[in-house]
Image (cartoon, rainbow, N blue to C red):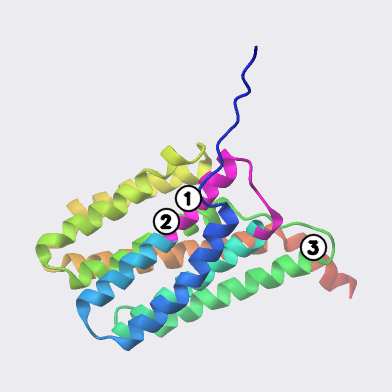
């Protein structure tokens, strides 16, 4: 007599997690603007961190249970962008980010959408570059850190920093080994070295962290945008010449 071993189903499917993440964004954003209480805003920021971590878990479940879907492939990145832009708006309102920063992010994303749609019209698929994938890792949860490090007591700043680093360094553990996660780990180690050993004493940790975050994000955003353009340059120039 043989026993059939069936793989248990997850509590939530990847698509359900994605939809839940999407629905959480709006009450969190509204709640942020309805309160000036710092402790409540810290809780909202932590909830946004959970929204970003949820993006990792739906990917893990999709791979482990072979539950990839067309809906998830298209809707999940949209939720990522909406959640990130919502958090940027919150930090701009609180004075921890500048509006020009969000403008650059939006401009880059709109140009990437144009390139993908333009290529799609010719039945050409433009895949995300390694820089774009690393960007997704490095600009989500660490953005929450920009706010938390600035508002928590100095004795808690290191805990926020180490928690953010732990999230980034454990990505290769939960996901299948890949070039982008290996690169994410190396960049994280480099950033930790910059934070611990090369920070000028006169610059507060919160200000230095924000400087590094903005600099790295702009580098990855612009770099990945250039990579998209470079990978589709022949198609773009060919169409332009043909017209």
Whether residue 207 sits left or right of residue 178 in the image: it is: left
Kindly identify which numbered label has been placed on residue 57: 1
Whether residue 135 sits left or right of residue 185 in the image: it is: right
Gap between marks 3 and 1, in whole Å?
36 Å
Above or below: residue 30 compared with residue 241: below
Number of numbered labels in the structure image: 3
**Helix, strand or loop for the magenta stretch, by majority:** helix
Q: Position of residue 27 (x, y in %)?
A: 42, 78
**Which residue does the numbered mark 3 point to in the structure image?**
235
Q: Does residue 237 appear anywhere in the picture?
A: yes
Mark 3 or 2: the one toward you: 2
Gap between marks 2 and 1, in whole Å?
7 Å
Q: Position of residue 223 (x, y in %)?
A: 53, 62
Q: Position of residue 159 (x, y in %)?
A: 19, 55
Q: Quadrant of the N terminus?
A: top right
Q: Residue at x 31, y 46 (%)?
A: 189
Displayed quadrant of residue 183: top left
**Which residues fall within the magenta stretch?**
52-71
Gap between marks 3 and 2, in whole Å?
36 Å
Dot 2: within a 10 Å radius of its alpha carbon, few (fewer than 14), some, or many (20 or more) residues?
Answer: some
Q: Residue at x 51, y 45 (%)?
A: 60
Q: Are marks 2 and 1 in contact (CB under 8 Å)?
A: yes
Whether residue 197 sits left or right of residue 185 in the image: it is: left
């Amino acid at each position: 007599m043989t026993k059939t071993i069936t793989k248990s189903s997850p509590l939530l499917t990847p698509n359900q997690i994605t939809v839940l993440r999407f629905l959480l964004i709006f009450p969190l954003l509204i709640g942020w603007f309805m309160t000036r209480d710092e402790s409540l805003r810290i809780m909202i920021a932590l909830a946004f961190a959970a929204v970003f971590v949820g993006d990792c878990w739906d990917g893990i479940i999709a791979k482990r249970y072979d539950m990839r879907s067309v809906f998830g492939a298209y809707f999940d990145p949209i939720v990522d962008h909406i959640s990130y832009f919502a958090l940027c708006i919150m930090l701009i309102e609180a004075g921890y980010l500048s509006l020009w920063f969000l403008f650059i992010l939006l401009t880059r994303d709109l140009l990437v959408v144009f390139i993908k749609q333009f290529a799609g019209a010719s039945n050409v698929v433009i895949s995300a570059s390694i820089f774009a994938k690393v960007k997704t890792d490095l600009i989500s949860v660490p953005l929450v850190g920009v706010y938390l490090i600035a508002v928590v007591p100095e004795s808690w700043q290191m805990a926020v920093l180490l928690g953010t680093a732990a999230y980034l360094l454990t990505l290769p553990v939960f996901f299948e080994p890949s070039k982008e996660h290996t690169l994410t780990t190396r960049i994280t180690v480099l950033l930790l070295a910059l934070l611990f050993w090369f920070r000028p004493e006169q610059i507060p940790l919160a200000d230095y962290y924000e400087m590094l975050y903005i600099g790295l994000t702009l580098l990855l955003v612009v770099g990945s945008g250039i990579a998209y353009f470079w990978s589709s340059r022949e198609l773009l120039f060919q169409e332009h010449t043909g017209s």
